[in-house]
Image (cartoon, grey):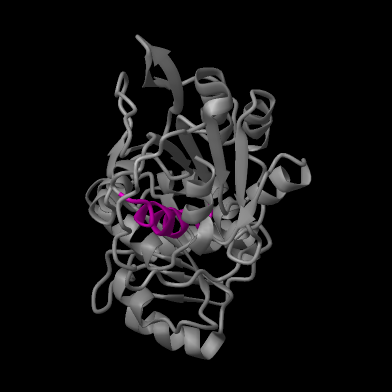
Amino acid sequence: MLVVDDSAFARKVVREVLSAAGMDVVGIARDGLEALEKIAELKPDVLTLDLLMPNLDGLGLLAALPALGAPRVVVVSMAGEASALGIAALHAGALGIVKKPTALATDRLYDLSAELIAAVTTAAQASSPRPLGELPPAPRPLEPLLARSKSLLVIGASTGGPQALTRLIHALPASFPIPIALVLHLPVGYTRSFAERLNGESALEVLEAAPGMELEPGRVLVARAGVHLRIVRHEGGLRAALDPLPSDTPHRPAVDVLFESAAHAAGAGALGVVLTGMGDDGTRGSRAIHAAGGHLLTESASSCVVYGMPRCVDEAGLSSGSARIESMAAEILLRL
């Protein structure tokens, strides 16, 4: 474990928190240039990375890491002005973001302890993601479908999800005939930046969900961090509802809550897709979609950064198909 931050107090807090959790912190670095030297010397498995640093910042460090054999990266940074940088870091290969509660050198930094330990533990168990690189050309428009059995696509992802979702949504044409809603586990303050970036890289319209927002063909709604996204029927159409409850779920928003609402709102017309991620969020919701007559697809282990969420759905016998992320768009189109 290597701790990279230009703040001496932040380095102290992160090192103490991880060491107290039994993790071996082999070194610290004050900027990206020093971090590259320490990575070559110490060969850490995981590093925590601040984004705003002198000499070489966090994004510069991520760009300088080798494609193979690089440590897995957890970003530890502020939201707000740095949100877009955090999303860029996830696209560049970082596996998670832990939001600092304050930019000041105060004991409030210790408030990140539980989230930091969980993120680093997950990163240590994950496969190294591949940088996105240049995305392929936008897909051709779909021919009109005379008969379509699906009316709603819902997607869930966690660790490794930003890259997986970017690949998937980019591969869907502007003429995609049904609305899409998705949950990605991100800290509060980052989902709008993620939606804006995905909107710029996709032929579809991608928006952070807001209460009452209509679900339309060609539109993707991204669940807002901190509240659950539910899909409800309203005057014959589908709309978004944001709900703080239940408050006892491991994640908010939860894939389970979105999928269960999709089963209720769309019945057999719901198609659920579970992508890379740690844990079992999405399994209960997949049961609801399956029971309503809908269908599920899962990302195959060979392309997952963490084969946790898809594995749980597969092992429950709920998935009707599995595909690598590069082929998932084609699998979805086959099942509309």
Q: Is residue 38 above or below residue 52?
A: below
Residue plotted at (59% across, 75% down): 45
Q: Which residues are magenta?
A: 159-173
Residue plotted at (57% across, 24% down): 263
333 horizontally vs 267: left or right: left
Q: Is residue 214 visible?
A: yes
Q: Picture coordinates of residue 226 (x, y %)?
A: 42, 32
Residue plotted at (38% across, 44% down): 101
Residue placed most toward the observer, 126 or 321: 321
Q: Main secondary structure of the magenta part?
A: helix
In the picture, the quarter occupied by the N terminus is: bottom right
Q: Is residue 91 above or below residue 29?
A: above
Give the quarter of the image for residue 307.
bottom right
Q: Is residue 166 magenta?
A: yes
Residue placed most toward the observer, 36 or 122: 122
199 horizontally vs 46: left or right: left
Residue plotted at (54% across, 43% down): 335
Q: Is residue 229 above or below residue 316?
A: above
Q: Is residue 247 visible?
A: no
Most extreme residue toward the top, as rendered? 235
Q: Picture coordinates of residue 151 (x, y %)?
A: 45, 29
Q: How many numbered dots are placed on residues in this image?
A: 0
